[in-house]
Structures are given as C-alpha cells and as structure tokens.
Image (cartoon, helix red, strand yellow):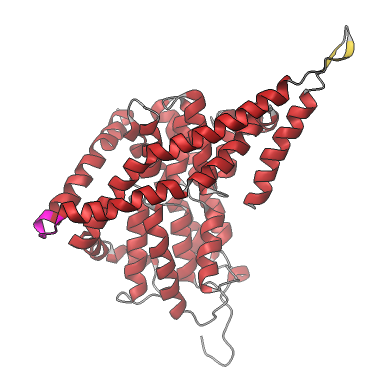
C-alpha cells in the first residue's frame, strides 16, 4: 500500500512537472499557446534535494526529546509505576475484555501497551502490543481468526489512546513553535472521540452475523 | 474559556508527569539518574532509525508538492472537505495517516516547515498525528505476528474510528485555534 502511495507521489510529481514544462496556456483571445521551459523540472530537482536535507535536520532535532522520554519511561518501569497503573485501570479492562480472565498475562501486556500509547511512546508500545497479541492467541480456539478480544485491542491501538503525543511535540519544539505542548489538550479531546467511536463500533459489529466467530468443529459453544 | 482550559491542561501535563515519574522512582529508591540514562541511550537509535523513512517520504511529498500535483488533487477534494473546516493543505495528511506513520510524520514536518509551527494547517496536522494511528501498519504487524488471517470486524471498526478521529481533530483545532 505504501509502495503505491510512494509511486503516486513521486511519479505523479515528476509527470506533472514534466507536463508543465510544455507551458501550455489557453485563453479565448490567443487560443492554445505553448511556452516550453525547463524551469518546472529544475525547481522539482531543487525541491527533492532540499527535502532530503530537511529530513535529516528533523531527525537530529528529535534525538534529545526521544532520549528524554525513553529515559523517563525506563524509570517508570523499574519503579513499578507501570504496574501500579495496570492495577488502577483493571475495572475498565475487565469490562472491555470480558473474554479474558482478569489475571491472565494478556491483561498486563495490553495495559502496558495502552499506557505506552498514552505517553505517545510508539516504540515502547509495539513490543508490548505484540506480546499482548501472543498472550491473546493462547486463548484463541480458531487460530487463524481474530477473537473479539483481539479485535477490541486492535481498535484501541489503531484509534490511538494518546495523552502525550511526544513525537509531534518534539517536532514542534525542533521547529521553534511558540508553545510546542499546546496540542496536548486538543489531542486528548480528539483521541477521546476516535476511541469512543472505535469501542462502540467494535462492540456493535461483533454481534453482526457477517462477523460472527466461526464455531469449532465438535465443540459446544 | 474552553481554549483556556485546554491550554492549561497542555501546560501542566508534562511537568506534572515528569515529577510523578521521577518522584515515584526516588520514593522506590531507584537510581533514577543511572536508569534514566540507560533508557535514554535508545533515543539516538530511534531518531536515526527513522531517517530513511523521513527521507523517502519527504522527498516524494516534496516532488508532489513542488510540481503542482498536490494543488491539482487538493483542488479536486477541497469542496468535500471545506464544509467540515479542513483546509486543503491538510488533505494529504488525512489521506496518509492510516497508511504510513513515517509518511504522516513527514507531512506534519512538511506543513511545519512550509507554513510555520503555529499555523492552522500545521497545528491541525499535529493534532491528527497525535490522535489517530497507522491503522494498516498496526493491523498487518500485530495480526501477522500471531498468524491471524481472518481479521473479522477489526478493519471496518478501525477505519470508522480513523474517520471519526480526523473529523474530531479538525473540529477541535478550529474551536481552540481557529
């Protein structure tokens, strides 16, 4: 998918610039006029090189803020703050995932993943999320089909329960925004909407016949 | 008033969170300095690891924008998005966000570079970046890792949530900063 998009952006850009080199212009008075020029293509080349340079500057500006968050996250893990958090949100988790036993390892892994997402730490969230999926798979009777718990967990992940969008704040800080963190409030609000919609949609859709869990042969469900 | 509360939450969130993490670590007799630096070492790797993705997507978007191709596409979609208050410059972000995290981050950076970090398009894209996720990537990686092929209602629900998140980001941006 990303390949297609990349080709469309890159190829489409070059083709459109090439077409503009023809300098076609139409007006009622003069009819179709052609003013060939290489300027659109030389402009395009300059834009390509400038963009490549800008991306490295951007990544360099990101190193500091990334290190800050990963350092703090490590402290929170070692001090047991993450575990404390897991215990606090247990009532919510039990309601969201009624098929998962409350003390199953899947619960802990999912909570840690969601906590990492809340702090905007995508790189910490992914390993924890994959661990959670493996734990959920141990509860799955039909191994090639997603369970309700898996789908709910995916909906939470893809709707992004974010409180501190650390990476974006980092980019804004690197670009000298007047107040890099001012987006936190709006992000919490918008993410609340998308997560609420995700949970409602997933709970409605899982009841539809079209998405019903297949019955395992020879087993009462 | 509403904007004031939102700005207040934004201002207080990070200092309070850092104090809570460090304070709790100290209370639990963690060697906070050593542990912090150990975790922070990862920061360099993460930043360097994203450079190839940033270059790929920033260059492609640069080409798409500089050639005028983006203006063509945006012009086509603008009548559809303007009634919810989404400026044309943000349309590529809304299209890219579910597909590629690095791509969406590239667009955020691109908008910040072009219009300035405090412009409406840059703020709106930053809020979209923070409040939605890379749906296709997450579904592919997470389900792929355990060999689940039939994802049932996961994708339609995720895409519905994406759409809701994007519209919510537009509305909130216009309310707070518009």
Task: Please check the rendered image and state whether residue A14 is part of the magenta-colored stretch, yes or no.
Answer: no
Judge left or right: residue A84 versus residue A12.
Answer: left
In the rendered image, which quarter contains the C terminus of chain B? top left
Q: Residue at x 61, y 32 (%)?
A: A48
Give the magenta range: B26-31
Q: Residue at x 34, y 46 (%)?
A: A66
Depth check: B83 or A83 in front? A83
Q: How many marks?
A: 0
Depth check: A153 or B70 in front? B70
A103 vs A160: above or below = below
Residue B69 visible in image: yes
Q: Position of residue A70 (x, y in %)?
A: 30, 51
* Quarter-of-image position of residue B86: top right
* Quarter-of-image position of residue A106: bottom left
Depth check: B16 or B77 in front? B16
Q: Residue at x 45, y 34 (%)?
A: A57
B80 vs B129: above or below = above
Q: Position of residue B85 (x, y in %)?
A: 53, 29
Residue B170 visible in image: no
Q: Position of residue B172 (x, y in %)?
A: 43, 35
Magenta residues, dominant SS class: loop
Task: Please check the rendered image and state whether residue B29 is part of the magenta-colored stretch, yes or no.
Answer: yes
Outermost right residue: A31
Q: Position of residue A186 (x, y in %)?
A: 38, 37
């Amino acid at each position: 998918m990303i390949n297609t998009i990349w080709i469309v952006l890159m190829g489409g850009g070059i083709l459109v610039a090439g077409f503009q080199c023809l300098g076609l212009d139409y007006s009622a008075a003069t009819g179709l006029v052609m003013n060939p020029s290489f300027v659109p293509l030389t402009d395009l080349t300059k834009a390509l090189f400038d963009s490549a340079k800008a991306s490295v500057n951007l990544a360099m500006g990101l190193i500091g803020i990334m290190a800050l968050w990963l350092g703090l996250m490590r402290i929170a893990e070692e001090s047991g703050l993450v575990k404390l958090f897991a215990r606090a949100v247990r009532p919510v988790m039990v309601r969201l995932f009624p098929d998962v036993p409350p003390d199953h390892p899947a619960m802990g892994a999912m909570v840690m993943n969601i906590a990492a997402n809340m702090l905007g730490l995508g790189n910490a969230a992914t390993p924890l999320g994959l661990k959670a999926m493996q734990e959920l798979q141990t509860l799955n009777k039909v191994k090639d089909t997603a369970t309700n718990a898996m789908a709910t967990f995916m909906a939470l992940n893809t709707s992004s329960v974010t409180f501190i969008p650390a990476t974006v704040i980092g980019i804004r800080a690197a670009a000298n925004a007047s107040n890099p963190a001012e987006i936190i409030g709006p992000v919490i609000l918008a993410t609340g909407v998308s997560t609420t919609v995700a949970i409602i949609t997933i709970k409605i859709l899982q009841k539809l016949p079209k998405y019903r869990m297949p019955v395992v042969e020879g087993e009462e469900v | 008033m509403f904007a004031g509360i939102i700005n207040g939450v934004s201002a207080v969130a990070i200092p309070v969170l850092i104090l809570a993490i460090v304070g709790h670590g100290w209370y639990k007799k963690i060697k906070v300095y050593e542990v912090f630096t150990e975790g922070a070492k990862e920061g360099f790797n993460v930043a360097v690891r994203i450079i190839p993705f940033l270059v790929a997507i920033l260059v492609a978007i640069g080409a798409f924008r500089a050639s005028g191709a983006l203006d063509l596409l945006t012009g086509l979609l603008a009548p559809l998005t303007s009634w919810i208050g989404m400026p044309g410059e943000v349309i590529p972000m809304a299209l890219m966000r579910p597909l590629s995290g690095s791509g969406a981050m590239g667009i955020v950076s691109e908008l910040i570079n072009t219009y300035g970090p405090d412009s409406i398009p840059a703020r709106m894209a930053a809020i979209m970046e923070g409040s939605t996720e890379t749906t296709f990537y997450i579904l592919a990686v997470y389900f792929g890792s355990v060999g689940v092929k039939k994802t049932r209602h996961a994708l339609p629900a995720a895409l519905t949530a994406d759409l809701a998140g994007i519209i919510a980001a537009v509305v909130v941006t216009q309310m707070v900063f518009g």
